[in-house]
Amino acid sequence: MTGAGADPEAGPAREFVVEADGGSRGNPGPAGYGAVVLDAATGETLAEAAEYLGVVTNNVAEYRGLVAGLRAARELDPDATVRVRMDSKLVVEQMSGRWKIKHPDMKPLAAEAARVFPPGRVTYEWIPRAENKHADRLANEAMDAGARGERWSPSTSTADLDTGRSAGGRTATDGGARAGSGTGAGTGAASAARTGAPGAARPPAEPTTPAEPTTPAEPTAPGATGSAADPTAAPGASASDTAGTRGAEADAGPPAARGDATGTPGPAGGRRAGAVEGQAAVGGARSASGGSAVRDGAGAAGPAGPEAGPRPDAASEAAAGSGAPGSVGSSTTSQAAASADVRAARTVASPGWGPPDMGAPATFVLLRHGETPLTPQKRFSGSGGSDPSLSAAGREQAEKVAASLARRGTVQAIVASPLARTRETAGIVAARLGLEVAVEDGLRETDFGAWEGLTFGEVRERYPDDLNAWLSSPDAEPTGGGESFAATGARVAATRDRLVAAYAGRTVLLVSHVTPIKTFVRLALGAPPESLFRMELSAASLSAVAYYADGGASVRLFNDTSHLR
C-alpha cells in the first residue's frame, strides 16, 4: 500500500518495525528511553534514539520512547507502515484502544504518538522483555549517561552489537550514522537513517523533566460481584487473623458482632525498571545493584535508596533488645523476627498472575488508629463527636505498629485523617520512620450525628426507627443529620483517586478510621455496601490495597494485628 500523499509510481510503502522501551531508576527517578527502527524485511537497524529524561516515571519514559521511535521512523519515510513492538503491556493495550487512558499525564503522550502517522498505519504488538533487549540497552545507556552528567552519544553506543542485531544487517559501526537523542515528546526524535555519511546524527537534546509523575488509571473494583477477577491479585493471599485488640469502637457503625520482572540486565549489570518481584504491601526491602532501574512501589526501598536486604533500623533493634550487651539470644531472636516479618510481607504482596509490566502499583497501607477511651466501650465515635485522643493503651499500640513498620522499611509517605486520634497515631509512626505527616480531610470518620458517644444498645433504645433504616440502606443518615454510608463511600472514592494520582508507584501509610478503611477494601473488592457490616477491623490493625495502571485493585492484607502481640 502507499501512504497518503505518496507518489503512486514510487512503489509500495516501506514497512518498519519500531522497538521502544523506557526505564526509571526509582519510579519516579532518573529515567531514560531507547528506541530502534528496523527494516521489517531484513531486520537491519536503520535508526536509533535514546535520551536521558531527568526524573520521571517508568510509564512516562516508555511513552517517550514510543514517540521517539515513531518520529525516527517518520524521518526515514513518512509514507511507511509501522509495526511497534514493546514489552509494556500498558502502552500496547492503551495505544491499541483496548485499555482506556484515564490519567492526564498519559493522554497527551498517547495523543502525540497517535499523530505521528495517520490512523491505520501503525499496529502494536506486545513482546516479552527478553525480545526487547536492543531498546532496553539504549534506555540504560541513556540513564547511565545521565548519571555521569552527560548526554547519550550515538558514537559510544554498543546496544546494536550487544544484542547481536548487527548480524541481520549492517553493523552499528559500519559507516552508518546512528540516530541521536530525541526529546520524544514535543520536539521530535533526533534520529537519523543509516545513510553511510558519518556525522548524520543530530546532537542530543537537553534532558527534560515532566512536571508530574504518571499514575495508575482510575481504579475499578473487580472481583466480588461478578466482574472480571483482578489478574494481579496474589493467589492464596488471605486476610490476616483478627486476633489482637478486638474492642472496636463504633466509629465503623454497629458493634463488632455486625462488623465494625526481574528486569533484563543492563549494560552496567543493573536491572531495568519493571520488576515487581518481591514487592511487599507493608514491607520487604529488596536488594538491587547500583545503577539498576527498578520500579519503586510496594516493597521498594524508601527515598534514600535501596538497601542490600532486609535490615531492621537501629531503633528497631534497640527496642527489641538486640543492642543489649551479652544478649546473644535476644539479638538472634530479634533478627529472626525481623526476617520473618519481611518474608511474610513479601508473601502477602506477591505480584500474582498479572503481567509484570504494568508498573509498580500505588499501595495504600491502611492503619486504623489506636484505642481511645471510647473504644473498649464500643461507643459511636465519628467526626462529629468529642474527637478523643488516644488512651495509654492506644499509644502503646501505635508504638508497636511503628516498630513493625520500621522493621519492614517500605513506607515512603504518611497521610492521616484530621481527627486527633489519627494524627496522634500517625505522629508516633512518623517519628519512628523519620517522615512527615500530611493531613487529608477525606480520610475522616463518618459523622454519626446524634449517635456520637452512644453505644449501639443506647441508639437502639432511643432511635429504633432511624437505626433500622440505617442498617437497611446505605443512603440512610444517622439521627440528627449525620453522614450516610453512601456519602462516606463517595468521599472515600474521591480521596482514593486523588491519593492514587499523588502517590503513583509508591507505598503510603494512610492512618484513618474503621468506616473509611472498610470502604477502601469494599470498593477494591467490588462488594456491596452491606459488606461494611460483615468486616471487623481492630484498633491499630493494618490492611493494604494496591492500585494498578490498568485500573485494577488488589486487596493484599486485612485486619493484621500480629504486631500487637
Image: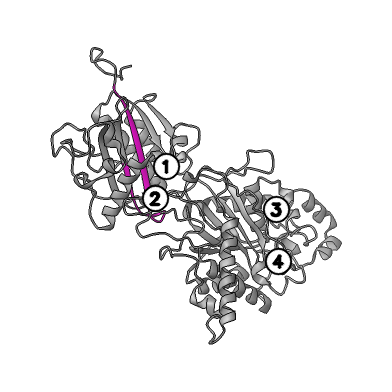
Which of disc 2 and disc 1 is earlier in sequence?
1
Q: Do the residues bearing badges 1 and 4 touch, measured as CB atoms within 8 Å?
A: no
- Which of discs 3 and 1 lies nearer the camera? The answer is 1
Which of disc 2 and disc 3 is earlier in sequence?
2
Where does residue 496 sit, x and y in percent of width and height?
56, 52
Magenta highlight range = 14-34
> For the residues marked 1 and 2, what is the alpha-carbon distance in whole angstroms?
10 Å
Which of disc 4 and disc 3 is earlier in sequence?
4
Q: Which residue is mark 4?
A: 381
Secondary element at tag 3: loop
- Which of discs 2 and 4 lies nearer the camera? The answer is 2
> For the residues marked 2 and 4, what is the alpha-carbon distance in whole angstroms?
48 Å
Q: Which mark is residue 129?
A: 1
Q: Main secondary structure of the magenta part?
A: strand
Q: Which residue is mark 3?
A: 484
Q: Which residue is mark 2?
A: 272
Secondary element at tag 1: helix
